[in-house]
Image (cartoon, rainbow, N blue to C red):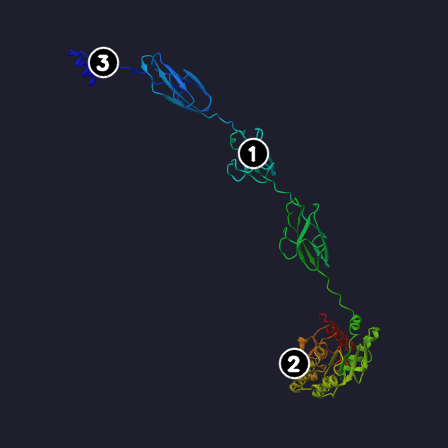
Amino acid sequence: MVLLAALACAGSGGSSESSPQVQQAGMPAFSPPGGTYASAQHVTVASATPGAAVRCTVDGSAPTAASPACTSLEVAETTTVRAVAIAPGYTDSAVASATYTIEAAVPAASAPTFSPPGGTYASAQQVTVSSATPGATVRCTLDGTPPTAATPACASPVAIPATATLRAIAVAPGYANSAVASSTYTIETPAPVEAMPPTFSPPGGTYASAQQVTVSSATAGATVRCTLDGTLPTAATPACASPVTIQATATLRAIATADGFAPSAVRAATYTIQAPPPTDPTLAQKLQALASKRQLLAHQSVGNNILYGNGAGGLDGLLDANPGSGVTIAYHPASAAAVPVGAVADTAIGVNGQPVGKVLDFDAQVRTRFGGALDYFGFKFCFTDIWTAQDVSDTWAQYQATMDALEAAYPGKIIYWTVPLMPDVTDVDGNTQREALSNLIREKYRGTGRVFDLAYHESHDAQGNPFTLGGVPALAHDWSADGGHDAHLNAVGATMVATRWVEFMYRVATGAAP
């Protein structure tokens, strides 16, 4: 509007004159433009104004007409280029500037390599990790995290005992950190070979006596481990004894363990120990076992048969047949001092037909005459002590009271005898009462193991068959002095009873099974 007004005034005849307007030179442009570059840049600078000269500075000062002309320049490091365009007939351009940031690329260290390479292996591996970059430090992880410059340096070599992925970078002065390299190692360790299973010598089987068993393995250095309690042996089971003693039927189980080997399979051997039944000692041996004992047999009549036989036999006959047995008979000793070691003291007791008196006399003999000093004390009733229809309750009351008191005073020393029987069919009632008393004695004292059952032996014949009269046990006629009426024993019967008595006393003295 101002310019147009000025022109109008002039056309209307005014005489004033205006000076022409001067244009400004075009501002220089840079190619390539300023920016960040990884290498030196060749920069051209130009102005669009024809004939314009471009003047540049790179030292931070503003360019002028006196600054160096520039149409191109090499920028090798970070620099700010300033330029102005100057042209005839133009005012100087505005100052243009461009900054070039040169960030030369730093070479990266060579990525690590692994030797041996990743893969599947049958055993632990020792891996060497390295970089081709001189002076590089290789840093590793095995925990799944990526390594950094702060990660510890790899071991040399890196142990890989189990499946794992090994990651690594290389770090070196003047180099960028390498790329992360990784390698996976799969460790498939084969199962160790088992130790050779144990063997047993002698082998399992049935034996007549205890066995000493040697248990061994063919694997060198193996330890053999055993159980006898039914459990399976393990590597924690104690080593076998050498040898293992098998005293009774048992199953021996064993394994072998050795360094570098898996435990062997369990082996077992069963040993059945069937010892032959013990040989029954001979009569001579049984007599010899009694040679250190002193015992009393207080009796009447049949007792004489047992001790001296009937013309032959009896204990006296057994001693004659076994000289040197050490057993003797001491006839009517007055005291314990008169009874030698190994002797049977033979004393008469009470009066026949008075059983209670015999019981009391026995008590006096044990306590007073012998002072309880012998090893065993026994007495037997006579068949004449119990007669037909005789009530045995009084006799039994006195017997058990006396015997219990003696047992308490001399425990383990009292021998209980059952009542001898009659062989006569006319005395069935008498035998009934004798058996009644014998049964009371059996029931009361059987548990002591010291009841000599004379009545039982008398009432079985030479073939071992029970002998009864009127359905009641009686003296078998095989043993009767006259074959059917006399209750005294013949020589064979006396020897039979004496033999059973020796066997009985042997069991009492030694604790042997019946």
| C-alpha distance separating marks 1 and 2 | 105 Å
Label of residue 40 in the image? none
> Which residue is more in the foreground, 322 or 245?
245
Between disc 3 and disc 2, the foreground one is 3
Q: First in sequence: mark 1 or mark 2?
A: 1
Dividing the picture into quadrants, the one containing residue 63 is top left
In the rendered view, does 147 fall on the left or right side of 72? right
- Where 427 sits versus 31, above or below? below
Q: Are the residues tagged 3 and 1 within 8 Å (C-beta)?
A: no
Give the residue at mark 3. 18
- Where 423 sits versus 257, above or below? below
Q: Position of residue 324 (x, y in %)?
A: 84, 73
Badge 3 amino acid: Ser
> Which residue is more in the foreground, 274 or 179?
179
- Where 305 sits versus 197, above or below? below
Q: Position of residue 381 (x, y in %)?
A: 72, 83
Between disc 1 and disc 2, the foreground one is 1
Q: Are the residues tagged 1 and 2 within 8 Å (C-beta)?
A: no
Give the residue at mark 2. 440
In the rendered view, does 58 fall on the left or right side of 412? left
Give the residue at mark 1. 138
The quadrant of the rendering that contains the C terminus is bottom right
Residue 186 is at least partly visible in this image:
yes
Between disc 3 and disc 1, the foreground one is 3
Mark 1 falls on what kind of element? strand
| C-alpha distance separating marks 3 and 1 | 82 Å
| C-alpha distance separating marks 3 and 2 | 174 Å
Crowd band around label 3 with a 10 angstrom C-alpha radius: few (<14), some (14–19), many (20+): few
Q: First in sequence: mark 3 or mark 2?
A: 3
